[in-house]
Image (spheres, grey):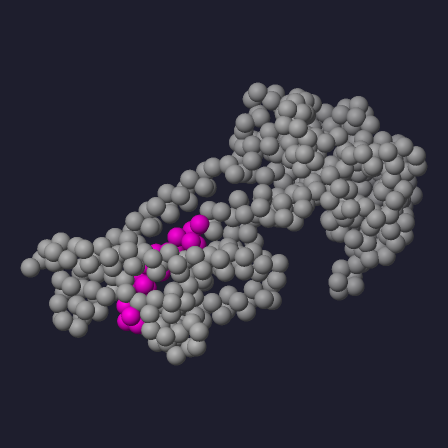
């Protein structure tokens, strides 16, 4: 991922500048977003369903194009990048993992290196390294099909696949949301350790405040396509905005209803 | 005289007609696939066009086969009496199941898989060949299977416009009010259909299991 990582040496990894995304009907999903993501940080996009989190993510890897404004990736407008090359330099993990069911775990993880025409031995070594990194012994899992994996294992493979070509940026769209609470906690802990170690720029989408507080170096709250505020986890819960207060209140037992005394 | 005695006695003609029959089916299926597969793939991205094309293919399917053969005879270039007219009509018949299943097979691939394929930086061509087509293959093959069996059956009618095939016995038998002659055409035709069904079914299950 040559050019993408070189450019990131200075300035922000990602920068939204008055970015708006509208549906063909004209309805905005994202309005006037101004947001910068520093190199190596984990920025959490927090918000309720339909707040525009996923849209924001897809604007970064150009699965969607902004209607107004722009997004700078390593200082260059996203539109000036070749979308295919750009995406190969940005790891992408989604909720259902999106593993190819007709490929083995090994082939799934080796996808981007293969697209980038790495030599076969290098791909194989890298796949093994990645599987070990996410806690799946390659000798046990390499030959399996996604259908033979648990939900947690699928997400681990999804993370391994996203990291395989060593992209400087990682986009994660509610990767742990569909997991049972214990598996989720395991993966969150491991992912936090991994993120600290790898120093990737990570944009992580979630609707779970706890997850946001645990994983984020900063948390950006989106509401109806607008950015409400960006705070460090330590400041988030005491932030003055009512939308953030609503999220903070949801942490309390039976939370969210201030009327109940 | 039994039907199989008749069949044995005329085995060289039965064999010849069977080959003719298979030839008609093979030619029609080849044309149908050459049109149906690319068209079905194109339709996935064009919802409006999809309604029209599937609608038209459906209408073709409702035309009684004998009538369709008849309609095509006066059409210039493709018409006339003989095998080429029959092949055009048969291709039209086989088109719907191929079109329909190509479309359905590709449209029903898990959107999360497509999204991650695009998001990881696969080109549209790579998504089609490495993800959509392999995942649609079992459904696609089911369509080819249905189309082939259908085509083998309808090809018996092609004899009515002088295209040959096993239908020759059937029409001759009807004219002679002779069941043995009818069966000498009908039974080999049925056997061909069953054989094709089994062979393609076997292939279909193999593909569903295998990695591409």
User: Does residue A167 appear in this view?
Assistant: yes
| Residue B133 shown left or right of residue A92 in the figure | left
| Residue at point 12%, 56% (across, down) | B9
| Residue B163 shown left or right of residue B50 in the figure | left
Q: Position of residue A204 (x, y in %)?
A: 77, 38
A14 or B35, which lies in front?
B35
Magenta part of the chain: B141-162
User: Residue placed farthest to the left in the image?
Assistant: B1
Characterize the magenta stretch by its predominant secondary structure: helix
A43 or B143, which lies in front?
B143
Q: Position of residue B68 (x, y in %)?
A: 37, 73
Name the quarter where the N terminus of chain A is drawn: top right
A220 or A161, which lies in front?
A161
Q: Position of residue B194 (x, y in %)?
A: 29, 51
Q: Is residue B21 above or below residue B207?
A: below
B138 or B170, which lies in front?
B170
Q: Is residue B196 above or below residue A25?
A: above
Q: Magenta stretch: residue B159 in it? A: yes
Q: Magenta stretch: residue B78 in it? A: no
């Amino acid at each position: 991922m040559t050019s993408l990582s070189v450019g990131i040496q200075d300035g922000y990894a990602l920068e939204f500048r008055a970015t708006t995304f509208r549906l063909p009907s004209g309805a905005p999903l994202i309005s006037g977003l101004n947001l910068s993501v520093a190199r190596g940080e984990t920025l959490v996009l927090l918000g309720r369903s339909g707040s525009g989190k996923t849209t924001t993510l897809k604007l970064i890897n150009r699965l969607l194009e902004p209607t107004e404004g722009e997004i700078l990736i390593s200082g260059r407008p996203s539109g000036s990048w070749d979308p295919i090359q750009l995406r190969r330099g940005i790891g992408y993990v989604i909720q259902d993992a999106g593993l190819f069911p007709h490929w083995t775990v090994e082939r799934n993880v080796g996808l981007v290196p293969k697209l980038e025409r790495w030599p076969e031995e290098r791909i194989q070594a890298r796949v093994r390294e990645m599987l070990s990194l996410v806690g799946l012994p390659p000798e046990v899992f390499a030959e399996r099909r996604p259908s033979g994996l648990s939900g947690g294992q699928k997400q681990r493979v999804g993370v391994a696949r996203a990291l395989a070509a060593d992209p400087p940026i990682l986009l994660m769209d509610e990767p742990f949301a569909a997991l049972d609470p214990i598996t989720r906690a395991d993966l969150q802990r491991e992912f936090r350790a991994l993120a600290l170690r790898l120093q990737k720029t990570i944009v992580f989408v979630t609707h779970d405040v706890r997850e946001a507080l645990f994983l984020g170096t900063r948390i950006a709250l989106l509401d109806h396509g607008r950015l409400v505020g960006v705070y460090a986890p330590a400041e988030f819960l005491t932030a003055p905005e009512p939308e953030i207060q609503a999220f903070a209140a949801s942490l309390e037992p039976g939370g969210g209803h201030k009327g109940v005394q | 005289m039994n039907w199989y005695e008749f069949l044995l006695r005329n085995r060289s003609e039965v064999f010849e007609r069977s080959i003719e029959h298979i030839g008609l089916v093979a030619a029609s299926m080849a044309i149908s696939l050459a049109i149906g597969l690319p068209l079905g793939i194109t339709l996935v991205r064009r919802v409006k066009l999809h309604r029209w094309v599937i609608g038209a293919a459906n209408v073709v399917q409702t035309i009684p086969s004998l009538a369709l053969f008849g309609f095509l005879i006066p059409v210039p270039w493709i018409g006339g009496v003989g095998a080429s007219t029959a092949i055009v009509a048969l291709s039209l018949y086989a088109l719907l199941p191929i079109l329909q299943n190509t479309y359905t097979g590709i449209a029903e691939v898990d959107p999360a898989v497509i999204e991650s394929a695009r998001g990881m930086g696969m080109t549209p061509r790579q998504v089609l060949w490495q993800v959509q087509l392999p995942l649609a293959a079992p459904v696609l093959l089911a369509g080819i299977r249905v189309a082939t069996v259908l085509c083998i059956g309808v090809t018996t009618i092609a004899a009515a416009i002088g295209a040959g095939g096993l239908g020759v016995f059937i029409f001759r038998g009807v004219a002679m009010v002779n069941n043995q002659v009818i069966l000498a055409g009908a039974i080999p035709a049925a056997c061909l259909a069953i054989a094709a069904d089994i062979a393609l079914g076997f292939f279909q299950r193999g593909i569903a299991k295998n990695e591409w």
